[in-house]
Image (tube, rainbow, N blue to C red):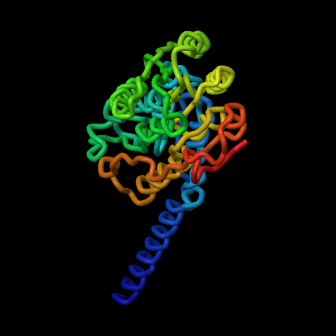
Amino acid sequence: MKQAVGQKTKKIFGIIVFLILILLSYANEKNFEIGISQFAEHPALDAVRKGFEDELKELGVKVNIDYKNSQGDTGTAGMIAQKFVADKKDLIFAIATPSAQAAKQATDNIPILFSAVTDPVSAQLVNSNEKVGGNITGTSDAAPIEKQLALFKELNPKVKKVAIIYNTSEANSEVQINTAKKVSKKLDIEIIPVGVNNINDIPQAVNSVIRKVDGFYTITDNIVASAINLISKAAIKNKKITIGAEEAHVQGGVLMTDGLSYYELGRQTGAMAKKILVDKVAVQDIPVEISKNTKKVVNKNTLNKLKFSENSEAFSGATFIE
């Protein structure tokens, strides 16, 4: 009798173990639901998204991506974030500051990762880059501004005034302007900031300053990035040097950069997503990361139009693109 009961108990226990293994197997096979909120459509932000998705794929993390683009509208960014919360996404990936701010406002429970945010602290996304203090962390696209401004002097020691066009309502742009003003003093360069409210203001902003400056420095600003072709064409026509904060600007006609790769920044953020979703690392234990590498990229067409030599020391070690 006892032996029969014991065998029955073992059988039940075996069934339970079997069911647990099935459930665990199902859990491991589960596709994580990720909502991607991208603030605008342009090469830099697109590259971040592609890098993020490619890294997750390479790491073997199975995900269903729900991609939404707010087309530069903060109200739409807010609605996208609220929809992701209502859909109970496993993680929200916010690309650019307004999307990250909207996501943070929408939830304090769902893990949020951001990228293409220049200063997460000033944007009030995290308490500090080391101790984020909540359910949000990510990667910063802070550019090496001093290194990039120094390129003006390498190309032409006579450069004295450099214009920066920026969106007056973007906090990260204000931060970059302040940094540029600070570091430019040691380079004997005067920064001439020109604020705009939207992309339609760009032509007038360029025309208002183009005869007063020796060049343009294009910062990581969503409006500027959307109008990079316009700025670069005007600068080339007027024989002005252009230095960009990142590679996508050079692809759009800016002469050169020594900056980060947004694709690689996206991959860094994808690795952080694995930590959160698979390794179960708490968001508050993951510091904000910055780009690990920079590279020098030169637009060969712009170089030729401005009559620079490829042998210039400023282009040493650069990758040339058409």
Residue 106 in picture, x, y percent from top left: 40, 29
176 left or right of 72?
A: left
Identify which residue is drawn at 60% across, 25% down. Answer: 240
Indicate the quadrant containing the C terminus: top left, top right, bottom left or bottom right: top right
Q: Quadrant of residue 38?
A: top right
Q: Quadrant of residue 309?
A: top right
Q: Quadrant of residue 305?
A: top right
Identify which residue is drawn at 27% across, 42% down. Answer: 133
Residue 304 in picture, x, y percent from top left: 71, 36
* Front-lying residue, 43 or 102: 43
Residue 79 in picture, x, y percent from top left: 50, 24
Up-down: is 198 above or below 301?
above
Up-down: is 195 above or below 320?
above
195 left or right of 47?
A: left
Up-down: is 209 above or below 142?
above
* Front-lying residue, 274 or 263: 263
Indicate the quadrant containing the N terminus: top left, top right, bottom left or bottom right: bottom left
Identify which residue is drawn at 45% across, 48% down. Answer: 291
The answer to whether residue 287 of the structure is visible from this angle is yes
* Front-lying residue, 14 or 253: 253
Residue 205 in picture, x, y percent from top left: 55, 12
7 left or right of 203?
A: left
Identify which residue is drawn at 43% across, 44% down. Answer: 139
Up-down: is 253 above or below 161?
below
Looking at the image, the residue that sits furthest to the front is 158
The answer to whether residue 105 of the structure is visible from this angle is no
Count how many numbered circles sit on residues in the image: 0
